[in-house]
Amino acid sequence: MKAVLLVAGEGKRFYPLSYNKSKHMIPVAGRPLLEHSILELKDAGITDILLVVGYKKDVLKEYFQDGAKWSVKIDYVDQDFSKGKGTAIAAGLARTFVGKDPFFLIYGDLQYDSMTIKEIIKEFNKQDVDAILTLLEVEDPSMYGVVELDKNNFATRIVEKPKPGQSPSKLTNAGIYIFKPIIFDAIDRTGLSPRGEYELTDSIQILINDKKKVKGFDIKDSWWRDIGRAFDLLDANAHYFTKIKKMVKGTVESNVTIKGEVYIGENTLVRSGTYIEGPVYIGDGCEIGPNAYLRPNTFISDRCRVGNACEVKASIIMAGTKISHLSYVGDSVIGENVNFGAATIAANLRLDHKDVSFKENGLLISTGLRKLGVICGDNVNVGCNTNLEPGVRIGANSIIGPNVTVSDDIEPNTLVYIKWSEMKDLYVKRKIEPEKKDGN
């Protein structure tokens, strides 16, 4: 069976990480997200893959090429957004690649394991159906496509993002499908949705209306994640760390403690006094320590520097980034070529211990996470003694001066600093009189 992955989107909800890179190329646990997806498909026996590409397509094509490195065959088709937007348009581009056989179609935002793919294939093979529609039950289905089933688990209706409290079901579309090529006929008959896009869910509804057999399949017992926002990367990172195996290719000085599954890349130096508590991945050409503390689920990419007496916890640190001495980074995603000055704190816990929130479209939205640090874009420079509060997002190419507390999002290409001349009234200055001693 072939697989079609829809990876053309820009990923605006991944701000600020998607400012200058494809979200599908963001690394977790040593590999880009899309590479993890391809390897899971390969493990499930699927080696013929089509990538529907658009945003930053040249980066994807250069990295994956024809797929031979992974013992798979990868083809590409470019999505021209000038001819219409939407998942139905993207899926329709697979018509020639697919031919006359059933195929997987998977949204590029998703992460899954090979067992999930195998179970879906097993379900399709034991049913005489035209499509498999994977489902997942959620508490709040208002952000998803909700699916109604009959008593035999065949889909009868799809409702896109119902209003809170008005959902006919809690079973939502999980974004992994098997289709027979009949789906392309439905795509040809799909019209514009209210938001001005051609939606694949509308195409599926056409199949349902035509009395085609669209079987719902609940994947509640499988590992599946919708990596829709930047902080979701930390969850995927932790999952893939379960596959990390201990390997030391670099140099480890004396008096270094390594516990658990820790990967240390080539030409990496781990200095004396450092304590590493796996699972941890450290890339090639890095310098760690002395006296650094790397806690579980920390991924450090190539050419990074974590200085003296630094602590990094459950974070993603991308290539070329430097965390200077006496700094703390907790539950954060830090982009490429970032420099954190000495004693920078990327805090991950609110003082009231409530869930961390972030801003989206002007609204404050809870992440559902009690611990979440900073999401920082590429090429950011942060001055010494700077505090970055939980849930803050820092745009690419920004500069933050020393002694600043950042409690709100920062747009890309922004300079933030304290103008001390306007703060003189906040400080009391007085001369210190010499201490008098008896007999003087």
Image (cartoon, rainbow, N blue to C red):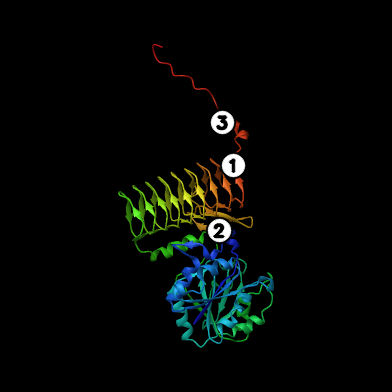
- For marks 2 and 3, the one nearer the N-term is 2
Q: Nearer the viewer, residue 323 or 109?
A: 323
Q: Amino acid at mark 1?
A: Tyr
Judge whether residue 155 can be spotted in this image. yes
Give above or below for 150 relative to 289: below
Closer to the observer: label 2 or label 3? 2
Q: Are marks 2 and 1 in contact (CB under 8 Å)?
A: no
Q: Amino acid at mark 3?
A: Tyr
Q: Which residue is mark 2?
A: 17
Mark 1 burial class by Cα count in 10 Å: few <14, some 14-19, many 20+: some
Determine the secondary structure under disc 2: helix
Q: Position of residue 111 (x, y in %)?
A: 49, 69
Instruction: Name the disc covering residue 113, or none.
Output: none
Q: Residue at x 61, y 37 (%)?
A: 419
Q: Amino acid at mark 2?
A: Leu
Q: Check the image and name the residue furthest to the top.
A: 439
Q: Check the image and name the residue furthest to the left.
A: 254
- For marks 2 and 1, the one nearer the N-term is 2
Mark 3 burial class by Cα count in 10 Å: few <14, some 14-19, many 20+: few
Q: Position of residue 416 (x, y in %)?
A: 60, 44
Q: Which residue is mark 3?
A: 427
Residue 166 is left or right of residue 274, and the answer is right
- Quote the CA–CA distance across marks 2 and 1: 23 Å
Dividing the image into 4 quarters, which one contains the C terminus? Answer: top left
Q: Residue at x 43, y 77 (%)?
A: 44
Give above or below for 429 relative to 55: above
